[in-house]
Amino acid sequence: MSEMLFKALTHRTPIRVALARHFIKQFSLFSYEQRLTIGAVDRPNYGYCIFQAARLARLLKIARISVIEFGCGGGNGLVSAERHIDEVTKLFDVGIDLYGFDNGSGLPAPRDYRDMPHYFRAGLYEMDRASLERKLKSAKLVIGDIGQTAAHFLEQFRPAPIGCMFFDLDFYSSTRDAMTLLDGGSSYFLPRAFMYFDDIVGDDTWLCNEFTGERLAIDEYNRRHETRKICKDYFVSNRYPNSWWTDLIYIHHDFAHPRYNDFIAEREQARHEGSIRLMR
């Protein structure tokens, strides 16, 4: 209890909110959707992206989507993603496949300063594959060098459209290589795919910046592509105020996707029109 209280006191979330979330999460109070709405779940960043991807798929009448985690390490993220998928598929009539990319042997050697060798060294975050596979229910592991696995993934697995991606590869070079998967064609993606980047804030030893790491990979991707852009999710911080992870949520917009312009805002527009009528 004292450790939890210390974390609450040193976190930017107001202490009463942090304690309430902890209590609700610990005892699974309310429905999953209600707990997710207030961030009282394990890895709310994963839950938010998976929920929103499934919601978009349902609005577009797409029956099945894929979720990807790049950089699994010990596998806690994959296990959490499976739990969220179990809950989200109860809410939406959408099937969800989960894939985890990792080289299986920990971080490779940093290539140059852009991989921030002052903070990372080869061998960190090694996977115990056998142990992880025993924990997983349905996720598929894609093991190997990310430059190769990302390049051949779509052809090899023929996945359902990808609705969200979690990037936890630490390095600029690995993140850049993983992003080659995004060049695989619109049919393999939702027109707007939710993204979480774990390594763009860091700490006061790491000192993330725009010229190294994931931020550099994002910037270079946007410079290379005219009609596909990785953009900040500007609304999520309003939905989850005072939450650390909202700064790490992005959206991959494929403006040339054949379904990008499909109108899906009936509910929102009806609500706005109702508000305007009440004001008159």
Image (spheres, rainbow, N blue to C red):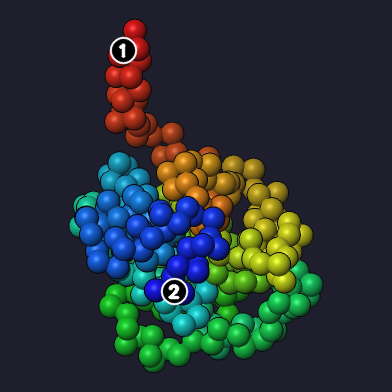
N-term mark: 2 or 1: 2
Picture residue at 62% right of the left edge, 71% below the top: 170
Give coordinates of residue 163: x percent, y percent.
Answer: 41, 55
The answer to whether 17 appears left or right of 89 in the picture is: right
Residue position marked by numbered label 1 in the rendering: 277
The answer to whether 176 appears left or right of 45 in the picture is: right
Q: What residue occupies the far top of the structure in this picture?
A: 280
Between 128 and 45, the one nearer to me in the picture: 45
Picture residue at 54% right of the left edge, 87% below the top: 126
The residue mark sitting in front, 2 or 1, is 2
Q: Quadrant of the C terminus?
A: top left
**Do the residues under discs 2 and 1 have CB atoms within 8 angstroms?**
no
Picture residue at 71% right of the left edge, 77% below the top: 119
Amino acid type indicated by mark 1: Arg
* Residue 21 against residue 106 in the figure, above or below: above
Give coordinates of residue 251: x percent, y percent.
Answer: 51, 49
Q: Quadrant of residue 147?
A: bottom right
* Residue 71 against residue 15 in the figure, above or below: below
Between 154 and 242, the one nearer to me in the picture: 242
Q: Callout 2: few (<14), some (14-19), or many (20+) C-alpha neighbours within 10 Å?
A: few
Local secondary structure at mark 2: helix
Please indicate, yes or no, whether residue 159 appears anywhere in the rendered image: no
Give coordinates of residue 104: x percent, y percent.
Answer: 51, 86
Between 135 and 206, the one nearer to me in the picture: 206
Amino acid type indicated by mark 2: Ser
Q: What residue occupies the far right of the structure in this picture?
A: 113
Give coordinates of residue 23: x percent, y percent.
Answer: 31, 63
The span from disc 2 to disc 1 (Cα, nearest Å) is 51 Å
Question: Which numbered disc covers residue 240?
Answer: none
Please indicate, yes or no, whether residue 7 appears anywhere in the rendered image: yes
Q: Callout 1: few (<14), some (14-19), or many (20+) C-alpha neighbours within 10 Å?
A: few
Residue position marked by numbered label 2 in the rendering: 2
